[in-house]
Image (spheres, grey):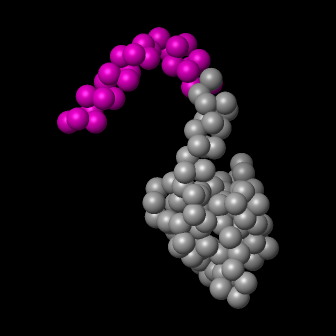
Amino acid sequence: MSIAWSDSTPIYRQLRDRVVAMILDGVLKPGDPLPSVRQVSGDFQINPITVSKAYQELVDENLVEKRRGLGMYVTDGAPEALLKSERERFLRDEWPALRARLLRLGFDLKQLLADAAKEDHS
């Protein structure tokens, strides 16, 4: 897990988002363990409380479960739940501004999608 920290978002949130991305990308699968709080804290030189806070958010969202004495593990169904919630968040929070900017710049949305499809097949 490599991370470049941004000053605009709390580190615990960035760490949480990185774990979410790893689950969505299939790097972490249901049943896989998360690196220990101690390991992440040492690897990235951040406070263990910061790591614990990020992990606790994942637990609160039922994406990760604590197994007493064993650590944290990705829950069954986490990738599907994340995909659904991340899509909803994108459509609610990001898409309206992105769509408005594309239209303001004179992009034709249908042509952009057609061009993207061509690139995917080449």
Q: Farthest left residue?
A: 122
**In terms of depth relative to the viewer, which is nearer, 62 or 26?**
62
Q: Nearer the viewer, residue 8 or 100?
A: 100
Q: Nearer the viewer, residue 52 or 32?
A: 32
Q: What percent of the width, then of the height, locates residue 101?
A: 56, 20
Residue 84 shown left or right of residue 55 in the figure: left
Quarter of the image for residue 77 reads bottom right
Percent from the top left, x then y, of residue 2? 52, 66
Numbered disc total? 0
| Residue 4 appears in the picture as rendered | no
Q: Residue at (67%, 32%) from the top-left corner?
A: 93
Q: In the image, residue 71 lies at what x, y percent?
A: 66, 81
Q: Position of residue 119 (x, y in %)?
A: 27, 33
Q: Tell me the residue at 38%/23% (across/down).
A: 113
Q: Is residue 57 above or below residue 43?
A: above
The C terminus sits in image quarter: top left
Residue 48 appears anywhere in the view: yes
Magenta segment, principal secondary structure?
helix
Q: Is 120 contained in the magenta span? A: yes
Which residue corresponds to the image point at 57% horizontal and 76% vertical from the top-left? Answer: 33
Name the outermost residue toward the front. 76
* Residue drawn at 70 percent across, 88 percent down: 69
Residue 120 falls in image quadrant: top left
102 shown above or below 65:
above
Residue 65 on the magenta segment: no
Q: Which residues are magenta?
A: 97-122
